[in-house]
């Protein structure tokens, strides 16, 4: 059972990664932070100015341990809202380890994962969505994920949620009044006004929820599945995009047996390209499993690059066959995506091997959004492909739209929406105010979970347990 974060203890942790480095930072937070570090510096922390660094010798018993830059803060003007001392020491694992031991001997407790940020939340320095954004910011490995985390940290999303809550709280108060005057049959809640207001909220929530798949794809990497019959050049395309000889290419159909995934960041957007086994009827169990995996990956991808051989498209019969093939695939993918509760990915047909035959012009099979002519072997047409893949994501980032990226937030928004919808349905059915109030309160509670205005017991441990130690 983790210790309660506000149990009055002073916590300490190495906040920089373990191992050798120029500098390491050990952070101490809590009521005893100054006292403890003051003792280790033989009384030389006294007289330091909060927010100003001071060079001091830290002692391990009677021996000097290190020359450290001490940066003290006085709560509540600090990251956690408590007294903090940051000890910037030389980046030696031995010094960091000894300093931690000295701090623990002096009464500090090693911090739990994310405990500094959790204390910041509990002291009202950040709301929960912003605290989560700190975790996302540390995990961000590319520009897109970074931008979304920084935006959430800035509080744009929280402001929106708070505005939703504020309006709902006002109505909740009116509903309470109605309950108090229950006998007298007075209506404090203007039903039409309520309906109009909640309908507006539901629209805005639907917009936020629609942005989830975009936000999630940007944060985690946009999945792009490369699909099509054997020998169309899928693996050649993966290699061409990566500019690396990653997948085995051969003119033997059925070369790729398993899915192969590689990431590539193009102009700040991270993509996850997935090469798959060629689609065909087969009696080979292993190949069949590869094909099953190909469909499964494609079903949850944001883009499916469906490869055709340009040489097959030079005759009307060839195009008819290809048309049927693409349409069937698109239908199957749409059904699978619906089963997963996700919007279906965009199907882009790639007419490959245009070094051997031209691609037909103006031909777009049903189910596909576009046909792009490429030669994977000669790396032609790939710029246009990369532009198309990044287009919507880049514009979403450029517009600075608020995009939900966190599954927990999506779930809470969905539940809010369901509760509000029930309240509206109840209103239409002429239900009494007390029944309306039940759904209304449930919506408020769900919204409150996003920013942490409402925190069920296990929620915080669950969220902060995923952080790294020292944050
Ligand atoms: N001329 C030409 N040949 C290509 C092109 N792309 C791929 N090829 C050739 O087509 C053959 C099949 O390529 P692969 O990339 O292995 O095809 P695949 O779709 O991955 O095939 P499977 O893994 O069997 O499903 C190889 O001999 C490639 O060199 C292209 O743009 N032009
Ligand atoms: Mg292959």
Image (tube, rainbow, N blue to C red):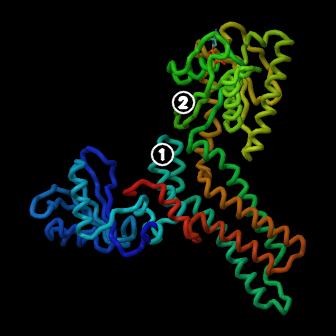
**Is residue 188 shown above or below 305?**
below
Residue at label 2?
A: 262
Ligand 2 under 8 Å from disc 1 Cβ: no
**Which callout, 2 or 1, points at the residue further toward the start of the chain?**
1
State the image coordinates of residue 328 (x, y, percent, origin top left): 82, 28
Ligand 2 under 8 Å from disc 2 Cβ: no
Quadrant assignment, res 39: bottom left
State the image coordinates of residue 176 (x, y, percent, origin top left): 73, 84
Between 285 and 342, the residue placed more toward the observer is 285
**Is residue 201 shown above or below 184?**
above
Q: Give the structural element (helix, strand or loop) at label 1.
A: loop
Q: Residue at x 55, y 20 (%)?
A: 247
Residue at label 1?
A: 140
Quadrant assignment, res 35: bottom left
Quadrant assignment, res 114: bottom left
State the image coordinates of residue 142 (x, y, percent, origin top left): 49, 40
Q: Residues within 10 Å of mark 1 (few under 14, many from 20)?
A: some
Q: Residue at x 72, y 34 (%)?
A: 346
């Amino acid at each position: 059972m983790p210790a309660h974060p506000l149990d009055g203890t002073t916590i300490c942790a190495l906040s920089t990664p373990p191992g050798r480095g120029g500098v390491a930072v050990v952070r101490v937070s809590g009521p005893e932070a100054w006292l403890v570090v003051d003792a280790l510096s033989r009384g030389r922390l006294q007289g330091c100015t909060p927010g100003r660094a001071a060079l001091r010798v830290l002692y391990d018993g009677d021996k000097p341990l290190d020359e450290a830059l001490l940066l003290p803060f006085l709560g509540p003007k600090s990251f956690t809202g408590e007294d903090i001392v940051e000890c910037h020491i030389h980046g030696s694992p031995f010094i960091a380890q000894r300093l931690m031991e000295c701090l623990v001997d002096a009464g500090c407790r090693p911090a739990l994962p994310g405990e500094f940020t959790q204390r910041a939340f509990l002291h009202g320095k950040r709301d929960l969505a912003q605290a989560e954004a700190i975790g996302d910011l540390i995990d961000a490995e590319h520009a897109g994920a970074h931008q979304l985390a920084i935006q959430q940290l800035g509080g744009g999303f929280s402001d929106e949620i708070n505005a939703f809550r504020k309006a709902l709280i006002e109505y909740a108060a009116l509903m309470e009044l109605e309950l108090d005057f229950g006998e007298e049959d007075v209506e404090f809640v203007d039903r039409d006004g309520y309906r109009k207001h909640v309908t507006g909220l539901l629209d805005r929530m639907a917009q936020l929820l629609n942005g989830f798949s975009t936000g999630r794809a940007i944060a985690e990497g946009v999945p792009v599945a490369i699909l099509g019959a054997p020998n169309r050049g899928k693996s050649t395309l993966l290699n061409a995009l990566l500019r690396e000889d990653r997948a085995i290419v051969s003119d033997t159909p059925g070369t790729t047996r398993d899915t192969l995934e590689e990431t590539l960041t193009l102009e700040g957007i991270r993509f996850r390209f997935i090469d798959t086994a060629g689609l065909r009827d087969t009696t080979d169990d292993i190949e069949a499993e590869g094909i099953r995996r190909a469909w499964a990956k494609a079903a949850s991808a944001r883009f499916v690059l469906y490869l055709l051989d340009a040489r097959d498209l030079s005759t009307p019969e060839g195009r008819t066959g290809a048309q049927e093939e693409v349409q069937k695939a698109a239908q199957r993918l749409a059904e699978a995506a619906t089963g997963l509760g996700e919007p279906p990915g965009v199907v882009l047909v790639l007419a490959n091997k245009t070094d051997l035959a031209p691609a037909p012009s103006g031909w777009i099979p049903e189910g596909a959004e576009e046909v792009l002519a490429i030669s994977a072997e000669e790396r032609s047409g790939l710029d246009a492909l990369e532009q198309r893949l990044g287009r919507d994501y880049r514009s979403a980032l450029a517009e600075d739209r608020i995009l939900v990226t966190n599954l927990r937030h999506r779930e809470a928004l969905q539940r809010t929406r369901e509760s509000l919808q029930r309240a509206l349905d109840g209103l239409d059915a002429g239900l009494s105010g007390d029944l309306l109030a039940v759904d209304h309160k449930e919506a408020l509670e769900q919204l409150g979970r996003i920013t942490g205005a409402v925190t069920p017991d296990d929620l915080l441990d669950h969220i902060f347990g995923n952080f790294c130690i020292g944050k």
